[in-house]
Amino acid sequence: MADLFVKQAEQYSVARPGYPQQLFDFIVSKTPSHDVVWDVGTGSGQAVTTLASIFKSVIGTDTSQKQLDFAPNLPNVRYECTSPSLSMSELESKIGTESSVDLVTVAQALHWFDHDTFYNQVKWILKKPNGVIAAWCYTIPRTDDEFDLVFQNFYLQSKPYWDLLRGLVDDKYTTIKFPFDPVDGCDHTGPFEFETKKLMKLSEFFTYIKSWSAYQTAKEKGVELLNDGVIEAFTNAWKGDENGQKIVTYPVYLRIGKVGDLLK
């Protein structure tokens, strides 16, 4: 997984959407303590700035140092580049001791993980019984009917170049394994739906596509997904404002749960 984003780390950092304040407000309202948060698969830190404004300490980890190089430098944020197969000893030395973390967040990355191993680490490091894990993904963006039709056809054509794990995102994380208890006030672990919006020019939308793992995979196979015909179809369908911009909406789907009492 780490190799899929190395070559387009800069595009990822500038083109990917942030996340809505309502998402963080909901997560924080379900997290009793706001001391330490571990942001796993932090990439170039799309979630870090908001987390750092709420929690005393943020630990952002990723397996790609190149991605971390583009993450924001904030006084209460510490970044760690971890091994793809994170051991318990590395977890303790780089992130924290047992029962030391209030919240674990995973933004647009859970589908890449070895879930059994990761969940065991989450259950070890979260405070019991109310430590919270929140993992979310966003699916394909929406703009308007004309452009969405062109984009959806393009997305279908890109399917052969996506890793099979991408299917968990297409399923809105409804089928992903998530062995945690519902947080207080909820009778299930989600997905709960939010949306994030980004004002973009068409050139910026192309940069977003170039940040896809599928785009890089296709390129390595000698296929240019954004060929002249595709660019023309996108250009004809893009009806921006006087500055050439459109509001692009990304649906966000959250799974959230608490660690519970592991002795029961």
Image (cartoon, grey):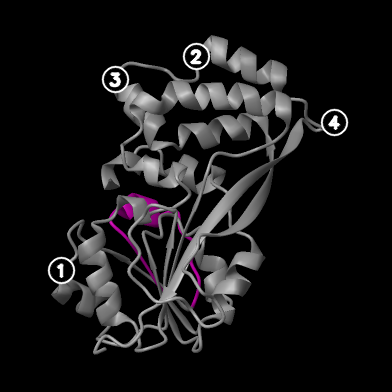
Placement of the C terminus among the 4 image quadrants = bottom left
Which residue is rendered at x = 75% and y = 35% of the image?
Answer: 245
What are the residue bounds of the magenta stretch?
59-75
Rendering coords of residue 77 (x, y %):
44, 74
Q: Earlier in the sequence, mark 1 or mark 3?
A: 1
Mark 2 belongs to which amino acid?
Asn
Rendering coords of residue 26 (x, y %):
60, 73
Q: Earlier in the sequence, mark 4 or mark 1?
A: 1
Tag 3, which secondary structure?
A: loop
Separation of marks 4 and 3 at Cα, in angstroms? 38 Å
Which residue is rendered at x = 38% and y = 54% of the image?
Answer: 109
Which residue is rendered at x = 40% and y = 83% of the image?
Answer: 131
Place residue 98 in its image quadrant: bottom left
Q: Is residue 2 above or below residue 257?
A: above
Marks 1 and 3 in Cβ contact (< 8 Å): no
Tag 1, which secondary structure?
A: loop
Q: Which residue is mark 1?
A: 87
Pick the residue in front: 7 or 20: 20
Pick the residue in front: 107 or 10: 107
Q: Which residue is mark 2?
A: 227
Rendering coords of residue 54 (x, y %):
57, 79
Is disc 1 surrounded by few (<14), some (14 to 19) or many (20+) residues within 10 Å?
A: some
Q: Is residue 143 left or right of residue 160?
A: right
Mark 3 belongs to which amino acid?
Lys
Which residue is rendered at x = 31% and y = 55% of the image?
Answer: 65
Q: Which residue is mark 4?
A: 242
Separation of marks 4 and 2 at Cα, in angstroms? 26 Å
Separation of marks 2 and 3 at Cα, in angstroms? 14 Å
- Marking on residue 78: none
Mark 4 belongs to which amino acid?
Glu
Q: Which residue is mark 3?
A: 221
